């Protein structure tokens, strides 16, 4: 009994009970009430855990962003639900940046690098873009709002600037990147030799002109679980080149 008390805390018991409760609740909602309600509950729980993880460590948030960005289009093809999944990417970047500010504020080590040429150029560029909202010759403000999503790239710049603060973090991120690249390449080879899955054919045929873009010269262009064949080729191209450079480096 003493061994039981030492090894198992009250918090761990609560966590197990909570997981068991959710394991019963979610299937019950799917069968008795609504499949959509169960999905919403699951997304809410996952989102809550993601937010906690980000504010616990912004580096964890960047890995979550990396994985989500890699698999977002696979999720879209499987679910076939008209949801703007891309908005979650911008939302994650904003959350990670806020977490970075909070965590670095305690250490007084956040670096704005305002004297660096690359930062000055970005500030000028993004300031010019923001001023375009007041342009009297602008065609549409809604189009400006839609395109303004790329402003989060500036926040991502600061996240990455602070993320790669040591060789250990660089190595771990590189390994994670290469693992995802290997998965992308492996699934692309699977598509080449075993063909596309049913959900992928449904996705291709969902838009009339999409088949014509993907079926070229008598062959179906492969895309793995990325957005399109171009992204697939570019991603594996620079990954292969980077891997070659790292293999020749003296470290």
Image (cartoon, grey):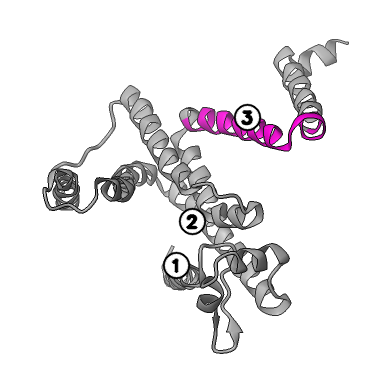
Q: Quadrant of residue 145?
A: top left
Tell me what residue is drawn at x 50 percent, y 52 percent.
69
Marks 2 and 1, how far apart at CA? 10 Å
Where are the magenta residues, as a range?
27-54
* Residue that carries the numbered disc 1 in the rendered image: 246
| Labelled disc at residue 45 | 3
Q: Quadrant of the N terminus?
A: top right
The residue carrying pointer 3 sits among few (fewer than 14), some (14 to 19) or many (20 or more) residues within 10 Å by Cα, namely few
In the rendered image, which residue does mark 2 sit on? 174
Residue 38 on the magenta segment: yes
Instruction: Please tell me which of labels 2 and 3 falls first in the chain.
Output: 3
When the figure is inspected, residue 139 is found, relative to residue 232, above or below; the finding is above
Circle count: 3
Left or right, 64 with reference to 140: right
Q: Secondary structure at mark 3?
A: helix
Front position among marks 2 and 3: 3
Q: Position of residue 98 (x, y in %)?
A: 36, 31
> Circle 2 sits in a helix, a strand or a loop, which is it?
helix
Identified at 37% across, 33% down, the residue is 100
Q: Is residue 15 above or below residue 80?
A: above
Are the residues at dot 2 and dot 1 in contact (C-beta closer than 8 Å)? yes
């Amino acid at each position: 009994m003493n061994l039981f008390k030492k090894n198992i805390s009250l918090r761990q018991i609560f966590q197990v009970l909570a997981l068991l409760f959710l394991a019963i609740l979610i299937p019950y909602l799917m069968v008795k009430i609504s499949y959509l309600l169960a999905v919403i509950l699951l997304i809410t729980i996952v989102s809550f855990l993601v937010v906690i993880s980000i504010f616990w460590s912004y580096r964890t948030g960047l890995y979550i962003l990396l994985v989500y960005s890699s698999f977002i289009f696979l999720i879209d093809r499987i679910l076939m639900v008209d949801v703007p999944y891309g908005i979650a990417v911008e939302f994650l970047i904003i959350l990670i940046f806020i977490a970075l500010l909070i965590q670095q504020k305690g250490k007084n080590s956040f670096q704005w690098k305002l004297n660096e040429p690359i930062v000055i150029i970005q500030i000028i560029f993004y300031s010019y873009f923001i001023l375009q909202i007041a342009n009297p010759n602008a065609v549409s403000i809604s189009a400006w709002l839609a395109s303004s999503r790329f402003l989060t790239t500036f926040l991502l710049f600061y996240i990455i600037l602070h993320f790669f603060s040591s060789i250990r973090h660089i190595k771990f991120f590189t390994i994670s990147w290469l693992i995802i690249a290997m998965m992308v390449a492996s699934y692309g080879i699977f598509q080449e030799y075993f063909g596309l899955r049913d959900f992928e054919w449904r996705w291709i045929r969902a838009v009339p002109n999409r088949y014509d873009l993907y079926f070229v010269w008598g062959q179906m262009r492969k895309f793995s679980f990325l957005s399109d064949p171009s992204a697939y080729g570019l991603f594996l191209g620079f990954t292969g080149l980077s891997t070659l450079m790292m293999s020749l480096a003296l470290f």
